[in-house]
Image (spheres, grey):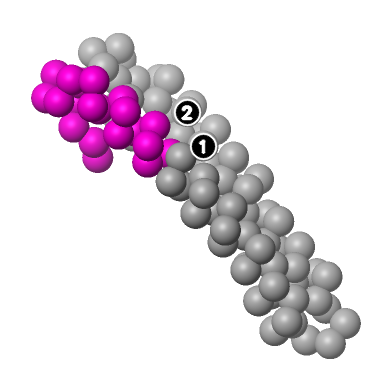
Amino acid sequence: LLPTYAQVGIWAPIGLVTLRVIQGVAVGGEWGGAVLIASENAPKGKSILYSAFAQQGSPAGNLLATIAFFFLSAMPTPSFLLYGWRI
């Protein structure tokens, strides 16, 4: 978890955005490798099916983010402002 705005000031949201950018770059680099490994190691005739599983990572991540947002939006405002925004 990141420190709060009260603890480090403007560096809290800057840190959050920086980490999200790094995460995006890392996932972009990992995706091609995942498809390649899945297709090369798949049984004969199943490379397309196995490669498709790598495509499910992004939709699965979006689904998990939606579920997390649902629970975060149900938090009381004081709790969200205290620690919920960092999740």
- At horizontal 83% and vertical 70% (from top left) the residue drawn is 48
**Secondary-structure class at tag 2:** helix
Say which mark, if any, is on residue 51: none
Question: Quarter of the image containing the N terminus?
Answer: top left
- Reply yes or no: does residue 62 show up in magenta: no
Residue matched to label 1: 65
Q: Which residue is nearer to you in this view: 18 or 60? A: 18
Q: Which residue is nearer to you in this view: 75 or 55? A: 55
Residue 13, placed above or below residue 61: above
Question: Relative to residue 87, is residue 30 drawn left or right?
Answer: right
Name the dominant secondary structure of the magenta segment. helix
Residue 46, placed above or below residue 30: below
Residue range in magenta is: 1-20
Residue matched to label 2: 69
Question: Relative to residue 36, is residue 26 drawn left or right?
Answer: left
- At horizontal 25% and vertical 27% (from top left) the residue drawn is 12
| Image quadrant where residue 38 sits | bottom right
- Reply yes or no: does residue 9 show up in magenta: yes
Residue 31, placed above or below residue 73: below
Q: Are marks 2 and 1 in contact (CB under 8 Å)?
A: yes
* Residue type (three-letter) at the residue carrying disc 2: Phe
Q: Which residue is nearer to you in this view: 39 or 77? A: 39
- At horizontal 59% and vertical 53% (from top left) the residue drawn is 28
Question: Relative to residue 44, is residue 64 drawn left or right?
Answer: left
- Tell me the CA gap for discs 2 and 1: 6 Å
